[in-house]
Structure formats: C-alpha cells, structure tokens
Image (spheres, grey):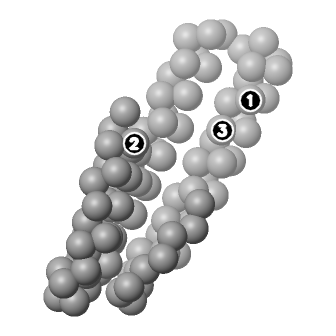
Amino acid sequence: MGHEHHHTHEHTQTRAVINRLSRAIGHLESVKRMVENGQDCSEVLIQLAAVRSALTNTGKIILQDHIEHCIVDAIESDDPVPMKQLKKAIEQFIK
C-alpha cells in the first residue's frame, strides 16, 4: 500500500480528517446497531446515505489538501509521479 514520494508532505487538515472519520465510524456503528435491532429498512438506508456522504466529504478535504500541498510541491520539484498517483486515486474515489 505504501509508495515512495520524492516530495515533502505538509498536510494542514489531518486533525479535521481524523475527527470526521471518527464521527463517520461512530455513525456507521449506530447503523449496524439499527440493523441488529431490526430497525426500518428505509431508516437504515437514509443513515447509510448519511455515512456515505460524510465519507465523500472527508475525501474531498483530503483531495483539496493533497492538491494544495503535495501536488504543488511535486510540480515545483518537477516530479510527475504524484500527479500520476493522484489521477489513479481520483479514478478509484469517484467509482
């Protein structure tokens, strides 16, 4: 899963991302309990949509931070690898 970087990383949104992921994990655990307790399927689906939205929004923060820092650094240092990796990651993210 790891990959070699030729540029430095300076992420400014790490704490915000961790907080959002923690909330999404808690939300997903509550959805699991809803299923275990036989809650209405419509309510479960609505809550799953909320979790999916939270994860997508977290991904957007990571993407913005990556572009503003990692990609800018890579362009300044003339390193094409991070741009290729970003393209691949975006393809996976928007599937």
For badge 3, the amino acid type reads: Leu
Q: Residue 28 shows which numbered tag?
A: 3
Quickly name the residue at label 2: 92
Along the line of sight, the residue nearer the viewer: 4 or 51: 4
Residue 3 placed where, x, y %?
A: 51, 70
Q: Residue 32 shows which numbered tag?
A: 1
Compared to 77, does 94 lie above or below? above
Q: Tell which circle, 2 or 1, labels the residue nearer the N-terminal end.
A: 1
How busy is the neighbourhood of tag 2: few (under 14 within 10 Å), some, or many (20 plus)? few
Q: CA distance from mark 2 to mark 1?
A: 25 Å
How busy is the neighbourhood of tag 3: few (under 14 within 10 Å), some, or many (20 plus)? some
How busy is the neighbourhood of tag 1: few (under 14 within 10 Å), some, or many (20 plus)? some
Q: Nearer the viewer, mark 3 or mark 2?
A: 2
Compared to 84, does 25 lie above or below? above
Q: Are the residues flagged by discs 1 and 3 in contact, CB closer than 8 Å?
A: yes
For badge 2, the amino acid type reads: Gln
Would residue 31 be visible to someone looking at this image? yes
Quadrant of residue 78 within the rendered picture: bottom left
